[in-house]
Amino acid sequence: MAKTSVANNVTRSNRKWITGYSIAGFILFIIYQFLIPWEGLPLGIYDAVYRWMPPSVINECLVYVIMALGLNIVVGYAGLLDLGYVAFWAIGGYCAGWFMSEFFYFLNIHFFGAVPAESPGIHINFWMVLILGGFICAFFGVLIGAPTLRLKSDYLALVTLGFGEIIPQVFFNGENFFGFNISNGTKGIVGVDPIPVGVKDLGPFDFGWKLLIFLLLTAIMVFVSLRLRRGRLGRAWLAIREDELAASMMGVPLMRTKLASYAVGAFAGGLGGVAFATHVNGVYAERFNFTISIFLLAMVVLGGMGNVWGVILGAFILSWVNGNGLTAFGQLYNEQFGTEVDFASFTFLLFGLVLILMMLFKREGLLPESRLKLMLHEDELDDEDASTSKKKVGK
Amino acid sequence: MANVLEAQNISVQFGGLLAVNNVTFNIPNKSIVSLIGPNGAGKTTFFNVLTGLYKPSAGKIVYGDREITDLPPHKIAEIGIARTFQNIRLFGLMTAQENLLVAMHSHLKAGITSTILRTPKQRKEEREAEEKAQEILDFAGVGKWTHEFARNLSYGDQRRLEVARALALNPKVLLLDEPTAGMNAQESQVFIDFINKLVAERDIAVMLIEHDMKVVMALSQRITVLDQGEKIAEGSPDEIKNNPRVIEAYLGKPKGARK
């Protein structure tokens, strides 16, 4: 029976992805680290790459992918609508700003940092800040979640929206936070430490190596997502997404389980935040705005809620269009037809259109999770049901 | 016989409406008891109180030697009171096996890190849980649907799967809310045999809410009748059958009986 195989595919999740992912990632790394800077490369190819997919854009896309994967755990797995995810991005970013820059100039703390010992500020090793940032975000996730997760769907979404506004605002006005300067306000924290990788320290322009690091972080998120999904917690999330009441009646503690999804999601936000800070070499409060939350949500929904590959695809496409794709297309179009249309200004018009079209024709997303597809194509399935049940009677 | 669950003088008030009024209800060990009554008598409300969904406005519930009146629903489920729902509430987009594994959630121990690292202990726990789930599915007669989505099962199988899911909690008390609703006579008979087998083989007590009198009479050792939130009768099936108050509650007063 066709339907049985659908269910089987769900239980047997793809285990071979690591091999394929490593090969693809390695090839990308070789291209961007060695092939693009190679002087023998024909200029045409070099130009094309820099127009369509420059190294900085591909790295930024990967940061979005990491964040979207984190949001997917909250929205896709546990079914909790979160409109304030940018808060975790901000907290993660400031963790990088605090712990690996000269921001706290009056201190002089070094811990396996990648800067000379005499430079002021806190300089903790990037990899440790990554973990630290993750945990601090997870802590804030629990802190925010504990009072708000008692609310149901729409109300929860509204409160998360509030938190998504409050936290960036705190940083935005953080020059004088009860007498302390926690964020440098609108000036932001400029310059974070390089990333030590043993052989060298990666500064802001080591795109190739950083690509490798971001690919690694993405892989970790995919790995964690897939593993959690198949385990005890993932099942409980799914059950809550399906029927909260029934889940609690079957012994699933709702608060704890939802908090866990918040914590894991926020942890990913922390990873993304720290990664982003190293990518842009600084932390700037005005970048953490509401549109990012919506943008990330759109990535999860368009790509296919609950399916990590769909989310990766959605995040990559949207952030690429936003970061570079539309501009590049505009350039091409204007050169071709001699016009002067400012394509980049139509980004949100395009996103709106895409969202409407997707909701009309492919609600489950580009690469949907098989369960969700089943739900959203109910009518077609019912016909199938009728035919199979007839067969059963025939037996 | 000792009682596994005692609900003492339970009252539930919704605003001005007294949905359950001072009802005392005990479930003896390894027994099958029923709660019947006309529509709106407060049966399901009473069920919801037992499972912690509603808090009673008065009275207390004792499970074994522990008072559970103020425990949250998931705790009550965890310590051994499982239920099914009047309208089936399976996790439709999860497989039969996953439905049971969710119910085992509180008995499994794997945390976030051990799940991510897939430690030998976590793998062993998962394997054992899956085996146990299969055993229960087989017992409930839906063993061939292990990897099928719950929503794809036939109505009767969904009912059976819901009981199986409740059993996965390893309960001492099983509360069934209209389990044979929508079943034909033959399916009801299969269900009666299943419940009898369940109580005979396992250390479990069953409480039924049921409208099908044939099922109630065939299964119950004791029947309690609710009407407008009040307990109007309690006794063996034979006693209940001939109780004038019960007949009155169901059929109304005979003509001229008012005087």
Image (tube, grey):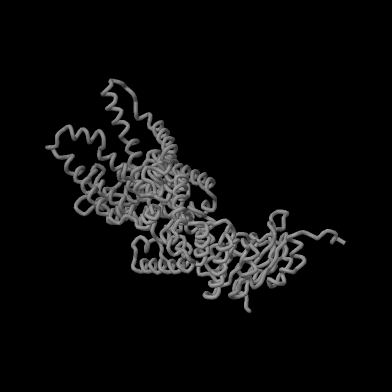
User: Residue at image x 49%, y 46%?
Assistant: A160
Q: In the drawing, does residue A203 fall left or right of residue B84?
A: left
User: Residue at image x 56%, y 63%?
Assistant: B186
Rendering coords of residue A249 (x, y %): 54, 61
Q: Residue furthest left?
A: A40
Rendering coords of residue B242 (x, y %): 74, 69
Q: Residue furthest top?
A: A338
Q: Residue furthest front?
A: A394
Q: In the drawing, does residue A285 fall left or right of residue A333?
A: right
Q: Image quadrant for the N terminus of chain A?
A: bottom left
Q: Residue furthest right?
A: B259
Q: State whether residue B207 is above or below residue B90.
A: below
Q: Is residue A93 visible?
A: no
Q: State whether residue A133 is above or below residue A321.
A: below
Q: In the drawing, does residue B257 fall left or right of residue A377?
A: right
Q: Image quadrant for the C terminus of chain A?
A: bottom left
Rendering coords of residue B176 (x, y %): 58, 64
Q: Quadrant of residue B195?
A: bottom right
> Viewer-proximal residue, B64 or A184?
B64
Rendering coords of residue B101 (x, y %): 45, 63
> Viewer-proximal residue, B231 or B155?
B155
> Viewer-proximal residue, A224 or B234?
B234
Q: How many marks?
A: 0
Q: State whether residue A248 is above or below residue A32.
A: below
Q: Is residue A40 visible?
A: yes
